[in-house]
Amino acid sequence: MATLLPRRVRSLASLAEALLTPHGVDRYLELVDPMLVRREIRGRVTAVRRQTPDTVTFSVRPSRAWRDFTAGQYVRLTVEIDGVRRTRCYSPCGPQGGDLEFTVKADPHGLVSRYLQETTRVGSVFGLSEPDGEFTLPTPRPEKILLVSGGSGVTPVLAMVRTLVAEGHQGEIVFLHYSNTASDVLYREELDALAAQHPGLRVVHAHTHSRRGGDLHGFFTKEHLAAAAPWYRDAETYLCGPKPLMDSVREQFAAEGLSERLHTEEFTAPPLTFDAEAAEGRVRFARSGRECDNSGKPLLEQAEDAGLTPEHGCRMGICFSCTQVKTAGRVRNARTGEISGEENEEIQLCISVPVGDVEIHA
């Protein structure tokens, strides 16, 4: 009986799914409780704290469709703001298994980060995606591991060090973290506790805007590297943080021929170039009936210029929130330069530039 009941439940759920098509049973279940959905992944906030005035840290208990993540990966988190679904990528910073933990720093110009920082409460429900990304530790683990982060870039590497400590990693680990001042340090107490728990872990705090309270001071230098982890040439290094920090570390490793040992995570897309002068043709948004001359900008911007508000997230081709069906015409992928002309294909509006006449189902 114990083995038959889940099968019966699954059969009833499948039958209900078929009867409720096209909306699907999830559309009705979420009216009762958003966490009852079967296919989509949702997360309910179970705890909230604010480590600094411009950040929010919250724990999320995912719904049944969640299948865990690998430390270092990111998740697309969706919220609804003024009736529009907005999606952004955030890296869970807890260890693998159990509830998820996120820390978000409010960007003064960031709609979603400011919304999360200002409004997240216990009981808030967000949409979640399957985890994604290749910024992960290898198996077996390297004997020597250097983790470098700056600001809110601490999140994926914190997940790594928490996982390594939980696994009882036998090698050496250095966690070199950059923050403006001592009052801006995220997870100081947790990092101290991890270092006390793991004899091979050393946490090094570098303060870029203060000469007090840290182990190192100023921006990243080769000397910082040598002081924090003299064995860095023999280690695997994992890096996430602001672009200037990423550029400096990447440059140093390249100068020493160590680029293959440096693994990076960055949510900043490389600059895209557009040739507005060579643009030609018309863009038609079929569902709304709006039309405009092709300006040469990505279709997301052209849609917004036309008064539309398509769903979008990262605006750099990572989160796929702006995916729409192109029903006719050709587009150029601004990241890869590839031109595609198939009818009824899905494209990402934020990185697709029309090549002549284009029709989008939007």
Image (tube, rainbow, N blue to C red):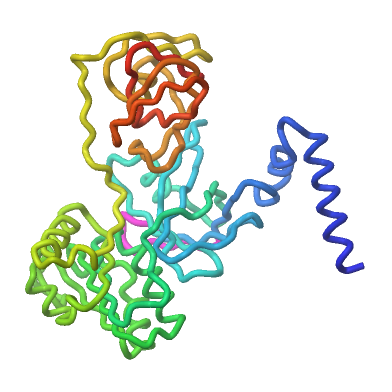
Name above or below for residue 224 compared with residue 349. Answer: below
Residue displayed at 29% across by 46% down? 107
**Can see residue 184?**
no
Residue 5 horizontal/vertical position (percent): 87, 61
Residue 139 horizontal/vertical position (percent): 42, 73
Name above or below for residue 167 compared with residue 249. Answer: below
Numbered disc total: 0
Question: Residue 320 versus residue 188: which sits nearer the camera?
Answer: 320
Name above or below for residue 26 compared with residue 2. Answer: above
Question: Residue 304 versus residue 237: which sits nearer the camera?
Answer: 237
**Can see residue 87?**
yes
Residue 275 horizontal/vertical position (percent): 20, 21
Q: Which quarter of the figure has residue 163?
A: bottom left
Magenta residue check for 48: yes
Q: Residue furthest bottom?
A: 199
From the viewer's perspective, is 206 left or right of 87? left
Residue displayed at 39% across by 58% down? 134
Residue 286 horizontal/vertical position (percent): 50, 13
Question: Residue 344 versus residue 272: which sits nearer the camera?
Answer: 344
Q: Residue furthest right?
A: 1
In the rendered image, the quadrant that contains the N terminus is bottom right
Q: In the rendered structure, which segment of residues is drawn in magenta? A: 46-56
From the viewer's perspective, is 346 left or right of 7? left
Magenta residue check for 284: no
